[in-house]
Amino acid sequence: MARYRQEPAYTHGNARRSAVVLANLGTPAAPTAEALRPYLKQFLWDPRVVEIPRPAWWLILNGIVLKTRPAKSAAKYATVWTEDGSPLKVHTENQAKLLAERLAATGHRELVVAHAMRYGEPSIPSVLDDLRAQGCDRILLLPMYPQYAASTTASVSDEAARSMLSWRNLPEMRFVRSFCDHPGYIEALAASVREHWAAHGESERLVASFHGVPRFTLDKGDPYHCECRKTARLLGEALALPADRMVVTFQSRFGKAEWLQPYTQPTIEQMARDGVRKVDVICPGFVADCLETLEEIGVECRDAFLASGGSEFALIPCLNERADWIAALESLAVAHLGNWLESAGDDGAGREASARRARALGAKA
């Protein structure tokens, strides 16, 4: 017989309460091998992330990977760690806080905004439990991955569903699948490039580097590659860039299997050998700076480009706490919250503002 956790007391007539959960990948608790080991184990044991038969992968993961990789990864994390923790943690917390402030300013003071991590803390189950304790019975889950991939977006959905298997009284759920072509997101990316160029001059090439995934995922029907290409195309159009100045690449390859190509570091090395002296890299698949942007691109790829003959290399920061990105995030959330914002806790001004933003979003899409 199924066992259920203790449910909060239910009272007829309770006001409906809505929540938005910004879900990102996650981070270890500290830049140490001891902290990396459980984090990597949780991350790499996810069958959405590594699609190898479990018995074989268990032996590889526990017999090799978790004995060697934690110390190497910890050393890299240490180079980007801040007094407040990992950059991903800091930026995601700030994004949730700023989104809550924007929504409250337009009359949605009863709307709860939280953040969760797929791996590490705060975990998705713990955040959903907390929202239930606050009386939230309508939850919008917003994975912070602009481009859909089974290994990221779908894994967030999996974890949310698993965490509620023992709930008797389920909340109403909505889910943002992707926002690779959201007008506000694209314009915020373009504005970040324009600002960088205004301060440092235009580069010969703008490289849009996305996190890689194994090549076979494309063959199996994962739309990630297409959505990355769409984002890059729209960004190039927003910047009015000639096709030969925008280059799309994929980073963070793991293992020996073929991943989506072209790979970022070999591409920029070849650019330098071909005589390109100034390159800028933007990472549109990340909305918050993290190890993969700050260390892999900002340090490793920069060093590789300069060593291959290049002269100037710049990493354009992720959207992080940019005001235009938080505004885009608000419009994305409002569009998916829809009629949930018409609850008794929201005043008329807030409902009208939401309606205007939703109409504007529809006109731009």
Image (cartoon, rainbow, N blue to C red):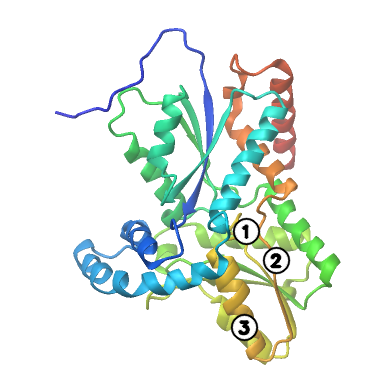
Dot 1 lies on which element? helix
First in sequence: mark 2 or mark 1?
1
Q: With 57 as the anchor, is 253 left or right in this view? A: right
Q: Find out whether the residues at labels 2 and 1 contact each other: C-beta distance under 8 Å.
A: no
Query: Label 2 vs label 1: CA separation?
Result: 20 Å
Q: Quadrant of the C terminus?
A: top right
Given the image, on which type of amino acid does mark 1 rest?
Lys
Residue at image position (74%, 74%) is 245
Work out whether 238 lies above or below 301: above
First in sequence: mark 3 or mark 2?
3
Dot 3 lies on which element? helix
Q: Which residue is mark 2?
A: 316
Q: Nearer the viewer, residue 240 or 310?
A: 310
First in sequence: mark 1 or mark 3?
1
Work out whether 61 lies above or below 338: below
The numbered dot on residue 303 is 3
In the image, residue 324 lies at what x, y percent? 74, 47
Residue at image position (62%, 73%) is 298
Q: Is residue 308 visible?
A: yes
Q: Nearer the viewer, residue 228 or 209?
A: 209
Residue found farthest to the front: 83
Work out whether 34 lies above or below 267: above
Work out whether 82 lies above or below 104: below
Given the image, on which type of amino acid does mark 2 rest?
Ile
Residue at image position (66%, 62%) is 232
Q: Give the total number of marks visible in the rendering.
A: 3
In the image, residue 207 lies at what x, y percent? 67, 72
Q: Which residue is mark 1?
A: 230
In the image, residue 278 lies at what x, y percent? 75, 81
Q: Which of pointers 1 and 3 indicates the residue nearer the eye? A: 3
Given the image, on which type of amino acid does mark 3 rest?
Asp
Dot 2 lies on which element? loop
